[in-house]
Every structure is written in structure tokens, then in C-alpha cells.
Image (spheres, grey):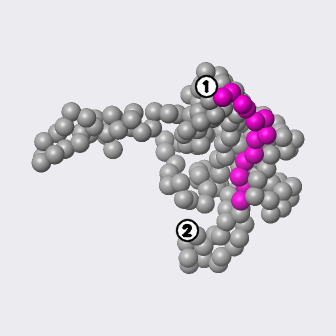
Amino acid sequence: MNENEKFVFEDKELEFGILDFWKYKYSNIWNMQEYIAEFLIEKALGLEKSQNTDSWTLYDINYRNKRIEIKETSYYHPWNENGKISNQRVFGITMANSSYENTEIENKFERQNDLYVFCLNTGKTKEEANPMNIKNWEFYIVPTKIINDICGTNKTISLNKVKNIAEQIEYFEIKKYIDDLIDKNQI
């Protein structure tokens, strides 16, 4: 939609529009960090918009014929205003049925992606955790075959385990890192 579109009543434009609605409903960006992480990775890869913007797809981004799953976690959560922060962070890595999106193919219960990008917002207060400041993010990239080997059928992986198997990648190095993995047939 165009940000200037207005709500209408009997063919008359009202004074408020879609941008007002977006501000009303979606201005708490701390509740939307999952989507911000996906957006950041798309932009890092030079994509205008991924084909997979529906939250019910089996992976988040199709890049150079590779399926990329973006996972996000953070220390700060707006509903936890008492300042208590859990340092135990986990990412979901649940397997799924391949026939979920296409009933014409053989059903396989497996991780439906080739690569994970794990994104951590490191801020521990609202001020420190602004998800629009890329300096607040850490990125870890792991081929799915490594996740399969290490985690088997586990549904989650801890941040500590991710840090043990992957090095932190700077935001502006994400595209080069993923391109190198693809070019070297490592995913």
C-alpha cells in the first residue's frame, strides 16, 4: 500500500490513513524485532523485498537459489519493565513438513532451509536495545547441515552453542560471507 492512502467513508477520504494506522499498531519496534532482523538481512543481501514475506513460509529468504532462515532473539523485552534480564537466549530450529507449502511433493520432516542467520539484539535496556541501530546487533551464520549434525532433532539451539560453532559476522560483511559459502558449495 501507499503510505498516503486514506481511509474512506462513502467515497470521501477521511483525515487519517494507512500511515496513521501503521504508527498506531506497529510503532513499538521492540515487539517487531523478528521482522526487523529479516529486513536487515534482506537489505544486507541487496534485496529489495524477499518473495517470502508471509510469516507462514518454511524459510524467510530465497537468495541465489538458497533458502535462508532468519532467527532473532534479544535480551530486552518491553513487557519486562522491571529490568530483569535473562542471559539465556535460544533460537528456534524446529523441523517442518515439506508438504506444508506444496502438497504435490514428497513429505519430508526436516529443516526446510539451507542456511541460518542468527541475529541477537545485545541491548539490555530500552535505550540500549534500539533495533534500528545496527551496532546493537550481532549476526552469526551457520549452514543448516552443521545445525543438523550438532543438534539432531532438537527444536532450539542456545545462543552459547551458536557462538561456539560460528563467528560473529559484521553487518556489512553478511553478503560476502553468504556469497562465499554459496560459491564454495558449503551450503
Secondary structure of residue under mark 2: loop
Q: How dense is the environment of label 1, judged by Cα within 10 Å: few (below 14), some, or many (20 and up)?
A: some
Name the outermost residue toward the top.
127
- Residue 21 lies, with reference to residue 146, above or below; the image says above
Q: Quadrant of the N terminus?
A: top left
Quadrant hosting residue 78 = top right
Nearer-the-camera pick, 39 or 30: 30
Specify whether residue 45 is in view.
Answer: no
Task: Check disc 2 and report the residue beneath it.
Answer: 101
**Is residue 26 left or right of 66 when viewed as pictured?**
left
Secondary structure of residue under mark 1: loop
**Is residue 80 left or right of 147 when viewed as pictured?**
left
The kind of residue tagged 1 is: Lys
Task: Check disc 1 and report the residue beneath it.
Answer: 126
Whichever of labels 2 and 1 marks the residue nearer the N terminus, that label is: 2
**Is residue 100 left or right of 90 when viewed as pictured?**
left
The kind of residue tagged 2 is: Glu
**Magenta span covers which residues?**
82-94
| Magenta stretch: includes residue 128 | no
- Residue 172 lies, with reference to residue 42, above or below; the image says above
Q: Quadrant of the C terminus?
A: bottom right
